[in-house]
Amino acid sequence: VRFIHLSSNAPAVDIYVDNVLRVQNVSYEDVSGYISLLPGGHSIQIKLAGTSTTVLEEPDLKFERGNFYSIYIVGNVNTRPGLQMVLTVKSVHHLRNLKDFPAMLNQLQHLQMRPTQLQMSYLLQVLWQY
């Protein structure tokens, strides 16, 4: 699972999974790296960065083996319903059908390109459309 902060007027946040800090200081437009979770239910807490103040919580999100999950932090802190989490999922089976994906990664390494997380996220979203 990865986390994407898309609330322009929300401060930076820390991400807790099962009450353990997993991702720190996620600001607007930041995209975290993927973290591995065991299949099953997990609690997700979004706290103001560096504090114990919880601003969003999902006590039992279900995750299945073989899927890539993105949790988007969206909304406006000044209007109702405020901040929200939006969960999306992509099956790993999409990646198995992308024969050119390894060649593309090799080419990036050969050119010594180091894409940002946001660029890599966009690349994967484009590839998942095929």
Image (cartoon, rainbow, N blue to C red):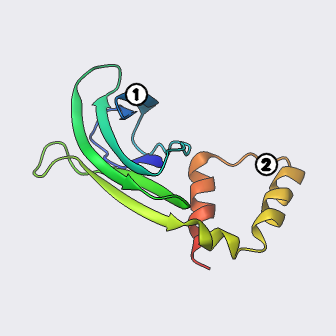
Q: Nearer the viewer, mark 1 or mark 2?
A: 1
Name the residue: 61% across, 73% down.
Answer: 94
Name the residue: 52% across, 61% down.
Answer: 67
Q: Is residue 49 left or right of residue 55?
A: right
Mark 1: which secondary structure? Answer: strand
First in residue order: circle 1 vs circle 2: 1
Residue receiving disc 1? 20
Q: Position of residue 65 (x, y in %)?
A: 52, 58
Q: Position of residue 107 (x, y in %)?
A: 85, 59
Residue 111 at least partly seen:
no
Q: Nearer the viewer, residue 22 or 37?
A: 37
Residue type marked 1: Val
Residue 105 at least partly seen:
yes
Q: Which mark is residue 113?
A: 2
Q: Is residue 120 left or right of residue 72?
A: right
- Disc 1 crowd rating (10 Å Cα; few below 14, some 14-19, many 20+) is few
Q: Nearer the viewer, residue 24 or 43?
A: 43
Q: Position of residue 116 (x, y in %)?
A: 63, 46
- Disc 2 crowd rating (10 Å Cα; few below 14, some 14-19, many 20+) is few
Q: Nearer the viewer, residue 130 or 29?
A: 130
Question: Which quarter of the figure has residue 114?
Answer: top right
